[in-house]
Image: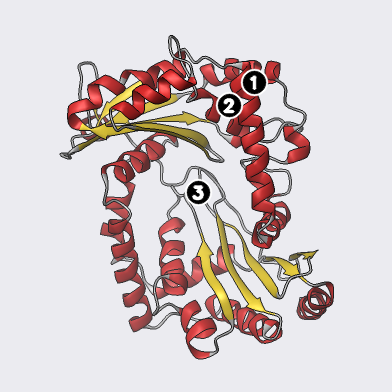
Amino acid sequence: MNFYYLKYKSNINVASIWVSGGSDKDSKHKKGINQILSSLLIRGCEGYDNFKLSDYIHSYGADLNSETLEDGILINIKSINMYFKNVYPFLRLIIEKPNLSKDQFKICILNTTNQIKKAKENPFNKAFDNWRKLVYKNHPYAYDSNGYIENINNINYEDILDEYNNFKKRKKILLSNYYYKNMENVDSFFSNKLFCKNLISEKKSSNFYERGFKAHYKDINQVIFLIGDKTCSSNHNDFLNLKILESYLAFGMSSKLFRIFRERNGLTYDVGVFNPLRKTLSPFVIYLSSSSNNFLETFHHLLNLWDQITSNLLSKDEIDLAKIKLNAAISLSSQTTEEIINRKVQLIGLNMDPKLDEKLIKRISKINSKEILETAQKYLLKLSLSICGKERYCNQIKKIWHDKY
């Protein structure tokens, strides 16, 4: 494990570990195994069963959490400064000497199964799952990090022990604003590192007819739409252009999506853009839900908007406002010690510059409308649409989609 220190004054100390490889390490028939493993890791370590560990951590008002993402596993602990030295050693213990109790494994299986069942109650999750499979096909990003019940049922205790043996070999980064000897300073360490802005060659097809479609029929009084495609890694030059486009479309009540679908026409319950940090091929997808009375009008507006952002330049006022909002959003996402530590350890773990956000802010003013349009045309002409709703509504959308494309 590599240890790094971030000089950051706060009343709270945080230490976060990024483990390279998350749900992308799940085997084909055991999707969700790394989610179960990460949950199990924080339920006991050498000398402490789950009750003793929980009591000890909470007696100091500390929090211990884990999260399994597509590219890695994030585990962190935090407390006020005066108690941190008492709880900090457990972060390393749960990584290197976990209990991996069989009884706790059964509880983790049950908890994960319940989470999956609960997620199924929201039709958006099914539509998003279908969209991922359309866009990513056999790529690890095509699957839910929590896994699927049919896969969870295939996972036994011996599988978890085998996965932990693999887990031990993975690259691990620990970042904290709590200093002790032998830790390297993030600023000094990375000032001598050369970070490649283009990790992969990402070529996009300009074939308008290569567009995917998937409908999930469900007896609900709304229609859910997800439309978009995979794009580039968050380390790519084009990433900032896509974030400005996201800001234009989805940030705040002045955003294009809000003005079209909520303010002017009152067509949607929920609307936004999903464009998260990813090691490679980050998704860029507009999501929205409309009532069954308005779904056709909503869909026509959605297609018209997509044509606009892939064929027209943003005006000076539009791009200036989008830049201001993106600048503010980046700053707002780093307000707490935990947010800062978690973000930077993830960037380091993905071999990205931990000062990426600061550098993006400096670059924002240099981006022009032509660059944003070129990026949109590069990544967003080959679309995939996933919808969820009553069969007769979905079939009407399907006909429009196939007639147009």
Q: Say if residue 33 shows up in the picture.
A: no
* Secondary structure at numbered mark 3: loop
Crowding at label 1, few (<14), some or many (≥20) Cα neighbours within 10 Å?
A: many
Along the line of sight, which residue is nearer the eye, 112 or 361?
112
Q: Which kind of residue does numbered mark 2 sit on? A: Leu
| Total marks placed | 3
Compared to residue 110, the image places residue 54 above or below, namely above
Label 1 or label 3, whichever comes before in sequence order: 1
Query: Residue at (47%, 25%) from the top-left corner?
Result: 42
CA gap, disc 1 and disc 3: 30 Å
Quadrant containing the N terminus in the rendered view: top left
**Label 2 sits on residue:** 37
Along the line of sight, which residue is nearer the eye, 381 or 276?
276
Residue 43 in picture, x, y percent from top left: 50, 24
**Label 1 sits on residue:** 160
CA gap, disc 2 and disc 3: 26 Å
Q: Which kind of residue does numbered mark 3 sit on? A: Ser
> Does residue 87 appear to the left or right of 238 in the view shown?
left
* Secondary structure at numbered mark 1: helix
> Does residue 95 appear to the left or right of 104 in the view shown?
left
Q: Say if residue 329 shows up in the picture.
A: yes
Disc 1 vs disc 2: Cβ atoms closer than 8 Å? Answer: yes
Q: Nearer the viewer, mark 2 or mark 3?
A: 2
